[in-house]
Amino acid sequence: MPFASALQRALPIGILVLATVGAPILIFEPQGLPRMKTMEQELARIETENADLRRDISTLRVEVRDLRDDPAAVERIARDQLGLVRKNEIVFQFGKAR
């Protein structure tokens, strides 16, 4: 019985020593706290990127709606992005002033 009594006293102390030594090792190893910090930074970057993409999608939806429903928007894009003109228009091109 003295062995069981000694084991009952030594076991909690051994577990405490193991936790005191093991916890910092597990926290500060490359897969511990530093990895968590890196992943938090990556998550913040991805959330910012997602917010930017949501804004872009919203803008594109408005543009698609305008192109579908507004002939003036179609004409504006044809003129601005494609450089198109109407048949009855005359185009004047001027050189850059020096």
Image: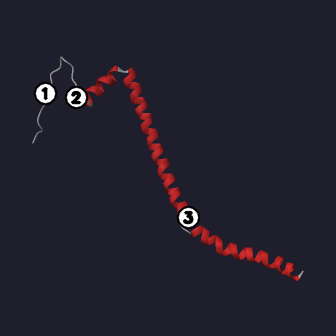
- Marks 2 and 3, how far apart at CA: 56 Å
Q: Earlier in the sequence, mark 3 or mark 1?
A: 3
Question: What is the x, y in percent for residue 62?
Answer: 42, 29
Residue 39 location (% of width, % of height): 52, 57
Quadrant of the frame with the N terminus: bottom right
**SS assignment at label 3:** loop
Q: Earlier in the sequence, mark 2 or mark 3?
A: 3
In the drawing, does residue 80 fall left or right of residue 48? left
Check if mark 2's residue and mark 3's residue have beta carbons within 8 Å: no
Q: Nearer the viewer, mark 2 or mark 3?
A: 3
Q: CA distance from mark 3 to mark 1?
A: 66 Å
- Residues at discs 3 and 1 in contact (Cβ within 8 Å): no
* Residue at the farthest bottom position: 2
Q: Which residue is mark 2?
A: 83
Instruction: Say if 34 sits above or below 93 in the image.
Output: below
Instruction: Check the image and report above or below for 48 versus 39.
Output: above
Instruction: Say which amino acid is labelled 2.
Output: Gly
Q: Is residue 63 above or below residue 38?
A: above
Report which residue position mark 1 lands on: 92
Residue drawn at 79 percent across, 79 percent down: 10
Q: Which residue is mark 3?
A: 31
